[in-house]
Every structure is written in structure tokens, then in C-alpha cells.
Amino acid sequence: MGTLELGPTHHDVLTRRRAVHPAAKRMVDEQLFARGIRDTRVLAAMSALPRHMFMPVPVRDEAYRDYAVPIGFDQTISQPFVVGWMSEALGLRGNERVLDVGTGSGYQAAVLGLLAREVYTIERHAVLARRARWTLRALGIDNVHVFIGDGSVGLPDHAPFDAILVAAAAPEVPAQLVAQLAPHGRLVVPVGRSATQSLRIIRRTDHGLTMTD
């Protein structure tokens, strides 16, 4: 896979723990790299994070499997490939302010926290938000800020954001989130209904918005 590099913000945190978690590294090799994900920073971040720590104890033995796993409140921790795919689509380089909509377990926010300067994440279920906040603190990831609220309206008081990632599919691109993009910012969101979803990337350019499926 070549040399794996992390952004400057949390490279020291991961070095103090262990730079690579064996089960996570295996997951990355077999489920992400093998399917074409090549962003070395994404691969490094997901190799370093103990994914099982973000899951309820009864399902922790499924943490590194190739599918989404329920975490309560009709929510799941996303399939590892989906986390890697969406993270790569954001194209983060380390200096960005990022909004993560739909905290869930906090795993996606943690990945983003290792890739960006500052992450704001919002979750409507207070119990999940509190669990995610505790896990992030336990792992020493202190640049991720967890909020409780309606993710569809984003966090206008903290906007603009250089990148926004939405975990759950929306019937159409949320206009309120687009409005919170900084110049040259990008929004990654699954759009559509059940079997007809596509991953849409919206970019704010000097000439307006561009959309890619």
C-alpha cells in the first residue's frame, strides 16, 4: 500500500497509542485498498482507529466485518468501505473545518478528526451523542465537537465549513447544508430512495455550484 501518512493534527496521538491496530489494518487492506480506495491518509486513519471501541459490547466481535452493524435507536455503524469511500470523496488535506451530519457511533467523526483540523458533528439521539463524545475523549481525539440536534439544518452558528459529510441518504441535496459551505467547499451526501441511491458531491466554485454523481 506504500507509505501511509496522517495529517499533522493527530499524528502524535496515534503514535502514543499504536500507529496501526492489527484488526483495523487487515480490514483496510481487504475491504478498502482491495476495492480501489487509494487516499493514503484515509487508509492510515482507518488502520489506526480501534473500530470496536465505537460499538456496543454485544456486537464488538462484528466491528471489522464487511457490513453495517446496528448500534441502537435504529442506527448503524456504516460498512467500513462506505466510511472510507465517503472520506476519500471529501479530499481532505489536514487544514479543513468539517461538518459531519449524523454522528451515530462517532466512528466516521473520528476518522474525519484524524484527517482535518476541526470537526463538528451533530446527532439527534442524545444517548448516541453522549456515547460518541465519551469514546472520542477516551481515544484522545479532542478536535471533534459533538452536538445534539437536527442534522438536516446543520450548524449555522459554526459555519462556514470547508467540507460537509452526510451519513444518511436524503431525497434531495439539503439546501441548508449547501448554504453552509465555504468558498471551494464540498458536500458529500447519498441522495435517493433505498435501492436507487447515488453518492453526490457538491462543490462551491468561483462560478457557482457543481454537482457530480
Image (spheres, grey):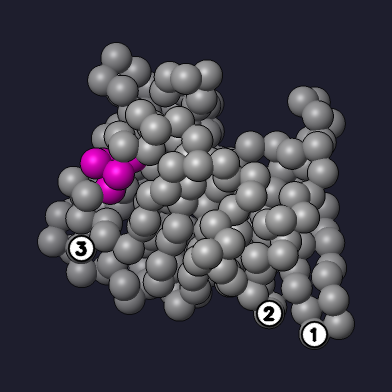
Amino acid of disc 2: Pro
Mark 1 secondary-structure assignment: loop
Q: Which span is picked out in magenta?
A: 132-136
Q: State the image coordinates of residue 190 (x, y, percent, origin top left).
A: 72, 43
Which residue is denoted by mark 3 in the rendering?
A: 13
Q: Residue at x 30, y 44 (%)?
A: 133
Q: Residue at x 30, y 34 (%)?
A: 131
Amino acid of disc 3: Val
The residue closer to the viewer here, 3 or 175, is 175
Which residue is denoted by mark 1 in the rendering?
A: 206
Q: Is residue 45 above or below residue 29?
A: below
Q: State the image coordinates of residue 89 (x, y, percent, origin top left).
A: 64, 59
Categorize mark 1 by other alpha carbons within 10 Å: few (<14), some (14-19), many (20+).
Answer: few
The residue closer to the viewer here, 183 or 89, is 183
Amino acid of disc 1: Asp
Pointers 2 and 1 in contact (CB under 8 A)? yes
**53 within the magenta span:** no
Q: Residue at x 29, y 14 (%)?
A: 58
Cα–Cα span, label 2 and label 1: 7 Å
Q: Quadrant of residue 178?
A: bottom right
Q: Residue at x 78, y 49 (%)?
A: 173
Mark 3 secondary-structure assignment: helix
Mark 2 secondary-structure assignment: strand
Q: State the image coordinates of residue 203 (x, y, percent, origin top left).
A: 75, 69
Cα–Cα span, label 3 and label 1: 37 Å
The residue closer to the viewer here, 147 or 11, is 147
Between tags 3 and 1, which lies in front? 1
Q: State the image coordinates of residue 62 (x, y, percent, origin top left).
A: 38, 22
Which residue is denoted by mark 2 in the rendering?
A: 183
